[in-house]
Structures are given as C-alpha cells and as structure tokens.
Image (tube, helix red, strand yellow):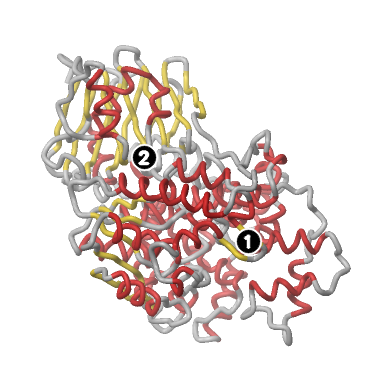
C-alpha cells in the first residue's frame, strides 16, 4: 500500500519542487521508498509501503520502452495469474510486483484493463506516447483517488493534502457537502468537503488529455435478477464458502506477515476461523477495548481468540486517549466527522505497526452485503406497519430491535411517534434511511445564519441522491434498495475511508477486505432476499457458513454496533486544551460555520452534566462542530508549508533526455 500524487500540465512542465512538497504529506502511507518521474507534461510522485517484491519494484514503474509510467496504491490479488497470461503473450518483466502487471495489461487492453483486476487500488498511468493520463479506482472505492481540474491541467493524489501542497488550489470548504455530511455522515458521489476537489468514483476510470477529462464506469453494483429458483439454503452456503475461501486465500498473498482484526463479532470471527482452519495456524489478531464498559467487547474478543487459539493483541482506549488522538484523526481523515469511532481504529493501527505488521484482514462489508444492520430490519418493519398504519401491534416489533432504548413501560408512545414519521412515503427511494437522515439533519441548526442563508434554495440531498440512482433501482426488492443506499453512501464514503483506509494508512498499515472481493459482492447481490434477511434474522447465509468455522455461541451472537465514547472525550474531566479554543466564540465567528451562541449552550449543558450529553443528536453535533473546526484550522487557515522537509532518498526518473 502506498501514496501517489502528480500533475499533468499541457501548458508547462510540472515543477519538481512541487512534487517534492507533495511527497512528505503522503509519507505515512508509504515510508519505505520515494520516487518521482518527470517529463515535459507529466510529473508523478510515489511513496511506497513495501509488501510485495520488497527489494525491487519501487515506483514509478514503466514498460520496456519507457513510454508508459505508473504510480499505484493498492494490491491486485490476482496478479500472478495475470502476469503468467501476459508473459505467455511475450511481455517481459523487470520486477516481481503486481504494479508492473498493470503496465503490461494496459499495453494489451488500454482503459479496459480494469475489468481484469481483482483488488483494491487507485492508480495513475501516464502514456507519454499518446499524451494521456489514465486514472482508475477499484470497484468498491477501498482506496482513495482525488483530483483538481483546471484548464489543460490536473492535480491528483491519494489524499487531499497532497493536492493542497500547490498554493494555487483553493482551500475552502464546500458548504453543500458539509450539509450532506451533517445529514448522512458522508459526501454524496464524487464530492469531497473541499471546493474544486473531487474523487474518482468507485468502479470508474478517467482519461485526461488535451481534450479534457472523460470519466467512464466499468462496474456498478446491481441487485437485479436474483437467483430464486427454490434452491435450498445449503446450496448458497456452499457457494459462499468457495468464494470467501478463495477471496481470503488471495488476500493472504504478501512478502510480509498478515494479521487480522478480531472484533468479537460474527464477521471478523468467521474470517479468523476460516484463516486458522484453511491457511494459517499461527495467526496474530488485534482488537480495540474500551475502559467504558458500555462500548467494550473485550469479553467476546478474548473468548474468540481463546477458542481460535490466536496470538491476540489489544489496545485499550480511554476517553482521554480519544480526545488526544482526535486532531490527528481529522488530519488523516480530511473530512468532518459525526462520530469518534475512527479514533480507536487509528490507535489500533498504531498497535499493529508496533507489532511489526503491515497488513491486516478485516471483516468490513459483511453487514452491508448480508443485511446485518438494524436499518434493514427497521425498514422491513415500517413497510409491514404501513400496510395497516392504524395497527397497535405492528409497531411493537420495533421493541425487538431496540429493547434498551424503547421499553414497553416508558417508550412505547415515543417509539411509535418517532418511527411513524413519513410512514406512508413508500415512493421515496431513500425510504429506508429517511428517518435517520432527517434525525441527523436536525444538527444543521448549529450552522451560522450566514451558512444557512447560503444553503437556502440549494437542491436538497434526497433530490440529488434520486437523480444518481440506477435505471433499474425500482425493480429491486425493498431490502436491495436499502442495501444499495448503505453500500454506495455509508460504506464507500465513510466506513472504507474515515474508519478504513485513512486510519490504517495513517500508520502505514494495509487493510484487506475478503468480503469485498467483487465476486463475493456480486454473489451477495444475487442472493434471494430471504437468504440475507428472513423476518428479523439477519445474515442468514453467512451465519450458516459461520457454523463451519466457529462454535455456535460465536456464530449466533447478536450484533453489537461498534461505537466509541463521545462527549466526555472533549468536555469531561480530561478534556484536551484544544477543544475550548476551537469552540470559543471568537474562533467560531472567525471560521464562520457555526452559531457561537448555540454552540456555547451545548457546551455549557455538557459541562453541567460532567461532560456528558445523553442525546444522540447532541453528541453528533458536538463531534461535527469540533471536527469541522479542526478541518478549518488544519487545511484552510493553517495548512502546513512542507517545503524543506526531508523525505528520505528520492528516486527521480524521466523520459530519456528530459529528466
């Protein structure tokens, strides 16, 4: 795993100094080697994390004629098979890396090369002969790739901060995207929190030439044509076992040790059991524990580690740890957050690296693919209720989902009122998520009058979301529609970014996701709905598969959502000093995003309660305000000038005669 950056400018030669300023900002992603390529139009920069071909394969990598140059971030897990096929066609290799395979595959197939790749990647390939830049990103958007477009010029990079190394690129927050994050936790589509900076969408490639930028899709998630021909559940279990086993097998390919995250839940425990049974009897596992028992899953993690006999490591997180780490979390995440959940994962990846590991398997994606979240069950209950909206019995099913929040004695009326909102709005494509979006969007009341005025009259998020839906969206069953929303917004633009790539790569650790092999994703999307969710029983086919690798108590354990402490991390007894300054009236007025009076009320309320805020919305508001203020301080107001910072030895290459 690595970091890439670069510039293609058809009017002037990219400056080596700017490329050198980009590299230090990506050093955490690839501290092992640095390389630069330059010619009269293109400049490519790369920071490498060595995982395959440790001694060779530093980037940029080129073809035999040195007319095609590549910088690349990720892994192509089927590269041995592709390499052999290319060698059979006469291609010659000078490294053992998967990177060079992409170069030769491009020579064979051009931009259609992405159809051949099974992996997680972002890449930038400069074709000097054709004078075109090819950018591309994996199907699920596991690895990031950002760009800024201007006339005859494009900047690109693995992280936004690398683009901002050029002072000519504006450093302003995009208010519409900020409002989206304060609604559904993440930007929509290709947007980012910064004006003028976008991301290559998952499953897309783009060609930049003198004619401009052309973006094309090579893959999209589709739940069309499910297999429902009466086959027994075991048929699908067998198929999933074969796919997941192969997905895991190829994700263990590395020239360095591979560990695994073990949360104690079904997804990661099943993966760990599969690895132990099929591939590795000396597996080391890693997890997060909390000093606050409301969030701690250590009992289940230790139980799983003991049963599966792994060498287990734990990082213990207290509120003070999260508060101290949060500015670095925001720096690496480059986006406002509504939760502190990324912070413990940031600390966890530090533990992984301290133990000598660069690669870990994780269970991300299973909840989205196999309907493990309560939002899917909630959607099914509300649709069932909507058939008889006068029913007193049907809404009581919600108590089975949230017994601790809405008890029959104290919460029946509140529960009914909360979930009855928009109950009959079944034609809303975001019906499954509408209550949650509406609930979260209420925290936009903390925006300043100026921001609210600028946003007034803008097209709202549901309308923009609806315009980007697949043409066959309404032909899918309601569960599939809910899953599509969760995968394309929450998984891609939040979980795989703020809790995934950014937190692992902050310490030079590569996360690998066996459930997100595109073959597993396509299989899950074709499953009959009852194999994903049957009544209120989730992950039906996955739980059945889990029985083959882990004991029934682990396979049948109900999901405990991963969460972390919030308000007391910032306003409790161990509150860090930076919080008071960022939330002060003067700092808030200077930044201009939030109403100082309303923020002061929120802070005082927490302080009266020992730093504790009971309301979910108030906790989200606090984190959203604080993280936005940090984004402003770090990227808009005080962006670091990295000139002169040492990046280690840099390999500089160029077109023959023009380096």
Q: At x 56% / y 45%, what residue is drawn?
A: 525
- Residue located at (20% from left, 63% from top): 354
Query: Which sits earlier in the primary sequence, circle 1 or circle 2?
Result: 2
Percent across and percent down for residue 72 are 30, 35
Is 153 situated above or below 123?
above
- The percent position of residue 342, horizontal first and vertical second, equals 42, 62
Q: Secondary structure at mark 1?
A: helix
Secondary structure of residue under mark 2: strand
Which corner quadrant holds the C terminus?
Answer: top left
Q: Is residue 478 above or below residue 276?
A: above
* Residue nearest the observer in this picture, 470 or 540: 540
* Residue 444 in the image: above or below residue 524: below
Q: Is residue 445 visible?
A: no
Left or right of 126? Residue 396 is: right
**Mark 1 sits on what residue?**
375
Residue at image coords 41%, 47%: 242
Q: How many residues crowd mark 2 within 10 Å: few (<14), some (14–19), many (20+)?
A: many
Q: Which residue is mark 2?
A: 119
Q: Say which of 438 and 361 sits in front.
A: 361
Q: Is residue 300 depicted above or below 507 in this figure?
A: below
In the image, residue 246 lies at what x, y percent? 36, 46
Residue in front for this viewpoint, 459 or 218: 218
Residue 470 image-quadrant placement = top right
Q: Residue at x 79, y 59 (%)?
A: 422
Task: Say which quadrant the N terminus sits in.
Answer: top left
């Amino acid at each position: 795993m690595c970091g890439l950056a670069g510039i293609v400018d058809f009017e002037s030669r990219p400056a080596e100094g700017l490329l050198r300023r980009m590299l230090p900002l990506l050093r955490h992603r690839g501290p092992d080697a640095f390389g630069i390529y330059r010619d009269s139009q293109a400049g490519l920069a790369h920071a490498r994390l060595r995982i395959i071909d440790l001694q060779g394969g530093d980037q940029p990598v080129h073809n035999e004629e040195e007319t095609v140059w590549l910088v690349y971030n990720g892994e192509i897990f089927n590269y041995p098979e592709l390499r052999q096929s290319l060698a059979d066609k006469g291609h010659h290799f000078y490294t053992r890396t998967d990177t060079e395979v992409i170069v030769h595959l491009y020579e064979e197939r051009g931009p259609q090369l992405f159809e051949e790749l099974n992996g997680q990647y972002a890449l930038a390939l400069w074709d000097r002969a054709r004078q075109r830049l090819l950018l591309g990103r994996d199907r699920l958007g596991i690895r990031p790739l950002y760009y800024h477009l201007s006339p005859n010029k494009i900047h690109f990079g693995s992280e936004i901060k690398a683009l901002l190394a050029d002072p000519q690129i504006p450093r302003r927050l995009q208010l519409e995207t900020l409002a989206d994050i304060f609604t559904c936790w993440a930007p929509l589509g290709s947007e980012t929190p910064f004006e003028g900076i976008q991301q290559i969408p998952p499953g897309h490639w783009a060609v930049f030439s003198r004619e401009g930028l052309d973006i094309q899709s090579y893959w999209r998630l589709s739940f069309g044509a499910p297999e429902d021909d009466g086959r027994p559940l075991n048929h699908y279990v067998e198929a999933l076992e074969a796919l997941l086993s192969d997905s895991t097998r190829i994700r263990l390919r590395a020239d360095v040790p591979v560990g695994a995250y073990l949360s104690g839940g079904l997804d990661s425990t099943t993966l760990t059991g599969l690895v132990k049974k099929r591939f590795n009897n000396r597996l080391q596992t890693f997890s997060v524990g909390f000093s606050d028992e409301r969030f701690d899953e250590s009992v289940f993690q230790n139980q799983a580690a003991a049963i599966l006999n792994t060498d287990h490591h734990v990082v213990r997180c207290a509120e003070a740890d999260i508060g101290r780490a949060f500015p670095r979390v925001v720096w690496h995440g480059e986006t406002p957050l509504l939760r502190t959940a990324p912070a413990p994962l940031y600390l966890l990846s530090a533990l992984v690296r301290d133990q000598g590991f660069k690669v870990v398997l994780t269970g991300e994606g299973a909840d989205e693919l196999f309907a493990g979240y309560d939002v899917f069950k909630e959607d099914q209950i509300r649709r069932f209720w909507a058939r008889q909206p006068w029913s007193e019995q049907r809404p009581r099913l919600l108590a089975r989902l949230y017994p601790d929040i809405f008890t029959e004695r104290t919460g029946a009326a509140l529960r009914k009122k909360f979930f009855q909102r928009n109950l009959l709005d079944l034609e809303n494509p975001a019906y499954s998520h509408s209550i949650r979006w509406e609930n979260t969007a209420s925290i936009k009341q903390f925006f300043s009058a100026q921001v609210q005025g600028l946003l007034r009259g803008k097209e709202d998020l549901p309308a923009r979301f609806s315009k980007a839906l697949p043409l066959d969206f309404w032909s899918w069953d309601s569960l599939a529609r809910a899953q599509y929303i969760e995968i394309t917004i929450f998984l891609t633009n939040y979980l795989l970014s703020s809790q995934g790539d950014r937190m692992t790569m902050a310490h030079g650790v590569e996360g690998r996701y066996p459930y997100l092999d595109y073959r597993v994703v396509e299989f899950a999307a074709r499953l009959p709905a009852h194999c994903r969710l049957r009544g209120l029983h989730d992950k039906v086919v996955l739980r059945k598969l889990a029985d083959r690798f882990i004991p029934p108590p682990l396979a049948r354990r109900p999901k405990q959502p991963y969460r972390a402490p919030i308000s007391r991390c910032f306003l409790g007894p161990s509150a860090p000093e930076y919080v008071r300054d960022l939330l002060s009236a003067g700092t808030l007025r200077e930044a201009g995003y939030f109403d100082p009076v309303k923020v002061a009320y929120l802070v005082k309320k927490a302080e009266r309660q020992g730093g504790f805020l009971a309301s979910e919305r108030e906790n989200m508001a606090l984190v959203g305000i604080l993280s936005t203020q940090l984004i402003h301080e770090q990227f808009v107001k005080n962006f670091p000038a990295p000139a002169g910072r040492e990046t280690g030895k840099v390999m500089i290459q160029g077109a023959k005669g023009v380096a």
